[in-house]
Image (spheres, grey):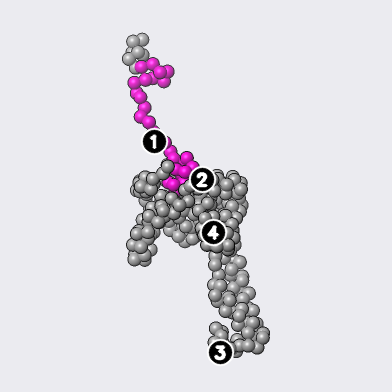
Amino acid sequence: MWIRSELKKKAKAALKKAYWPAVLVALISMLVGAGVGGVNVTYRGNSDLKTQIEEFQTQIETGTVTSSAAVPADISVPLITFILTFAGIITVIAFVVATFLLAPLAVGCFKYYAVDAREGSYINHVLSSFGPNYLNIVKTMFLKNLYIFLWSLLLIIPGIIKAYQYYLVPYILADNPEMSTKEILRLSKETMRGNKFRTFVLQLSFILWDILAAFTFGLLNLFFLYPYKALTYSSLYNTLCGKEIPTPQPVDTNYTFDGASNDTMNNF
């Protein structure tokens, strides 16, 4: 059983111990689009604009162009085709960048925070995904986001539930990049059983901070809130998955290596 206040206490201690590296990783995370407590590296094109252009192209082809059309009536079909092609190319490029560059970087950021929350971390952990298990990381993150997207097509609620089931995927992947995708998804799903709603409440507990951060043009988010939340959620992962580093026990100096007391040894 975990307690929110304890997780936040650990997060504050870790943040105080290595403040500026945590802020730097927060900046990187925000730039690559990594969410705290789960990675959401996705690209969404301007669907409204594309829909309007496609509708107007249909109107041109059928001769039913109206004065309320979103695009001037004298625009040519080749120009519309060029715009659609260009938009498609940009979408593909954005998808490739998000999948093969931003998602692995996000996993590296999660690794930094997960390790930092339990034992202290190094900034080079951000690039840890670009190694021998790079393709496995790319595949796992892609399938995780794909499954959440497909469940979201049914209704919003199933998508939310699936997102919380896979909440720990980037953390498990960061700690075990060689593990199969199927096993990572299974472990996350099993670990989050009974913890999904409590995790939601944990996220909700930051709402006042989020409101306050909205009035600081992102400065509070960068210099405190983002790393604070990231370390809190990393502490949750460490607790749920048994990654906590035990508190060192004091050494009994009254005994030697073979169990004999010092007083006994002095008699020889």
Instruction: Say which label, 1 or 2, has the lower sequence index.
Output: 2
**Magenta range:** 234-261
- Chief secondary structure of the magenta span? loop
C-alpha distance separating marks 1 and 3: 73 Å
- Return the residue nearer the eye: 139 or 126: 139
Q: Amino acid at mark 1?
A: Thr
Categorize mark 3 by other alpha carbons within 10 Å: few (<14), some (14-19), many (20+): few
Q: Amino acid at mark 3?
A: Ser
Categorize mark 1 by other alpha carbons within 10 Å: few (<14), some (14-19), many (20+): few
Categorize mark 2 by other alpha carbons within 10 Å: few (<14), some (14-19), many (20+): some
| Location of residue 73 (image quadrant) | bottom right
The answer to the question of whether label 3 and label 4 lie on touching residues, with beta carbons closer than 8 A, is no
Q: Amino acid at mark 2?
A: Thr
Where is mark 4, residue-wise? 159
C-alpha distance separating marks 4 and 1: 39 Å
Is 236 placed above or below 222 here?
above
Magenta stretch: includes residue 256: yes
Where is mark 1, residue-wise? 247
Place of residue 84 in the rendered image (x, y in percent of width and height, measured from the top left):
61, 76
Question: In the structure shown, which secondary structural element does the residue marked by tag 3 occupy?
Answer: loop
Residue that protrudes farthest toward the right in the picture: 61
The answer to the question of whether label 4 and label 1 lie on touching residues, with beta carbons closer than 8 A, is no
Where is mark 3, residue-wise? 67
Where is mark 2, residue-wise? 191
Q: Amino acid at mark 4?
A: Gly
Q: Which of labels 1 and 3 is toward the front? A: 3
| Location of residue 64 (image quadrant) | bottom right
Magenta stretch: includes residue 93: no
Place of residue 98 in the rendered image (x, y in percent of width and height, measured from the top left):
55, 61
**Number of marks:** 4
